[in-house]
Amino acid sequence: MKKFIPDSITLLNLLCGTLACILAMMGQSVPAWLFILAAAGFDFLDGFAARLLNAVSPMGKELDSLSDLVSFGLAPALMLFQQYLYAGHTYSAFAYCALLLVLFAALRLARFNTDPGQGVDFKGLPVPGAAMIAASAAAFASVCARTQTDSLVLRLMESSWFIPVLAAVLSALMVSRIPMFSMKNKKLNFKLFPKESLFFLLTVLLLFTLTILRGVGNPILNAAGWLLTVLPLGLLLAFTLYVLMNLVAPRGNQNSNR
């Protein structure tokens, strides 16, 4: 009976990803992004539950990858596709470049399931990491557009070249062999995990700084304001920082993960 608990959590991941896809096609970027965040939470919890209950199974591994393909491959791709398609660009066919995320996410997840040498850390950008960059950029641009707030992210997302380039770069990073650290089962310990600890502290500092700069101080609107104006930009910058940290100081031969 206990083996069904992790699988049920994984199905919640898939449900959130499916809802994110529907909302993305309706042009609702922020709600779609919120469901992708929820899917990421369930993606973490299903693995935690499987290890806690000693209920790791081959079927659970396959189900997890199928769910991740929808939640972190298809959903953010549709967000970018929709944003580009209705931005009024002359060559709207370039919107289909966003679908590269789906194809390369599938390749990465398939490699994860068939590579016996994968363990503690990653090789290449994990699919949820790519999703956080793409979906957070789309969500933050949507917030800025609706509030008529100028930002570099909005200008980039409305340009004719940025979304196709972003999709191509994230796709290449997902199937690359660049060593990238994982935060799974790591402690805040600069001696044992210096890069992971530094990334965690920089992310906290980044979110704190953005909270101050964005002026989220009204007690009534504090939670909603932080969620909509700080968190999407914070996640976008944090995962961009994650990529840069690994590109600047890559590890040696490490095991990979999905």
Image: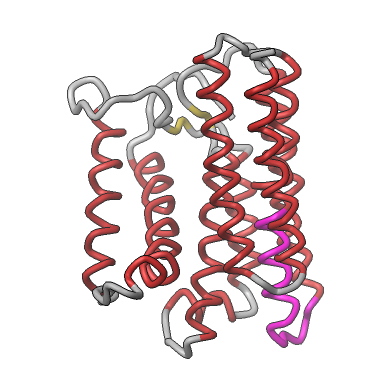
Query: Which residue is at a point 25% across and 48% down the rendered structure image?
Result: 202
Position of residue 179 measured from the top left corner of the image (x, y, whole percent):
46, 30
Position of residue 172 measured from the top left corner of the image (x, y, whole percent):
62, 46
Left or right: 246 as drawn, with respect to 65: left
Residue 222 lies in the magenta-colored region: no
Residue found farthest to the left:
191
Residue found farthest to the bottom:
148
Q: Is residue 218 above or below residue 253?
A: below
Query: Which residue is at a point 39% across and 31% down the rendered structure image?
Result: 183
Q: Which residue is nearer to you in this view: 6 or 240?
A: 6
Location of residue 184 (image quadrant): top left
- Colouring mode (rainbow / by chain / secondary structure / one colour): secondary structure
Q: Give the total number of marks visible in the rendering.
A: 0
Q: Is residue 163 above or below residue 69?
A: below
Q: Quadrant of the C terminus?
A: top right
Position of residue 203 measured from the top left corner of the image (x, y, whole percent):
30, 50
Identify the magenta region: 75-92
Q: Is residue 56 above or below residue 211?
A: above
Magenta segment, principal secondary structure? helix
Q: Is residue 16 above or below residue 46?
A: below
Query: Which residue is at a point 43% across and 46% down the rendered structure image?
Result: 243
